[in-house]
Image (tube, helix red, strand yellow):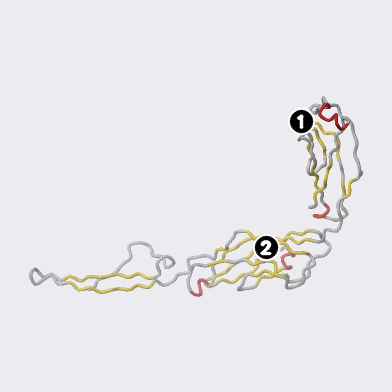
Amino acid sequence: KGGVIRNLIKLDREKTPDINIIVQAVDGGEPPEGPHIATASVQIKLLDENDNLPIFSQDEFEANIKNNAVIGTMVTTVRARDYDDGAFGSVNYDIAPTSDSTTSYFRIHQTTGQITVSTALPNDVDYLSVPLIVEATDGGGLVGTCKVTISIFGDNNYPPIFEQEEYTMSVNENVLPPKVLLTVFATDQDTAYFGEVFYELIGNTNSKFAIDRSSGELSVVRPLDFETTMECDGKLIIIIIILYV
């Protein structure tokens, strides 16, 4: 009568690819002649099933490229791993088709995952965000995906310029904060992304003033005291800078 070996739990080749079992056969003999025991070694090698999706090292990737980059310029590289064996563990990359024509600016190497410029980039924009969905397909047809966002930048050619070189105003020391005092305004000849300007205060204002980063509104945010500015004839100079984007 043969002995049948069965598994009692679910087997996983990725965790335990090889299993070694010692089997004993015992006869029905009685002492002192028996029982007699024989042993045998059984080696089991688990065959692979395609039960793992390719998994990217990140769910999302980001990269930047200048709009004057030539065709073939490397942008970034994505990687995916499949824990299956043999052909089931091999991975090929592709950019998922989409109705967005901007995805045609880039291509991906089938085996290395390297993304490069495939056609001339638009040179009439300062900023363009191109979202890609990259697919990794294993040898059994299972697919894993990740998102790649590529930002195309133009040149930042011009500095911001204030509408006025100097802003002057008077304010009573008993003004109740928060109170908007004035609004400064600056422009930038660059377009789109590089044409945006943001404001910031520098110098020692004792945290009594604040400026809205986007609108340029200058406000009193803490009580003022004329006596603390007597050394400056009661005047306080506030320097505002524009942050380049």
User: In the image, is 126 to the left or to the right of 93?
Assistant: right
Quadrant in which residue 10 is drawn: bottom left
**Disc 2 or disc 1, which is closer to the eye?**
1
The answer for how far apart the CA atoms under marks 2 and 1 are is: 48 Å
Write down the residue under mark 1.
Answer: 222
| Label 1 SS | loop
The amino acid pointed to by label 1 is Arg
Question: What residue is rendered at 81% in x and 27% in y?
Answer: 225
Callout 2–callout 1 Cβ contact below 8 Å: no
User: In the image, is 49 to the left or to the right of 43?
Assistant: right
In the rendered image, the residue lying farthest to the left is: 32
Question: What residue is rendered at 65% in x and 73% in y?
Answer: 109
In the rendered image, the residue lying farthest to the top is: 174
The amino acid pointed to by label 2 is Leu
Write down the residue under mark 2.
Answer: 132
Residue 60, horizontal then vertical, whole percent = 63, 59
Residue 198, horizontal then vertical, whole percent = 80, 47
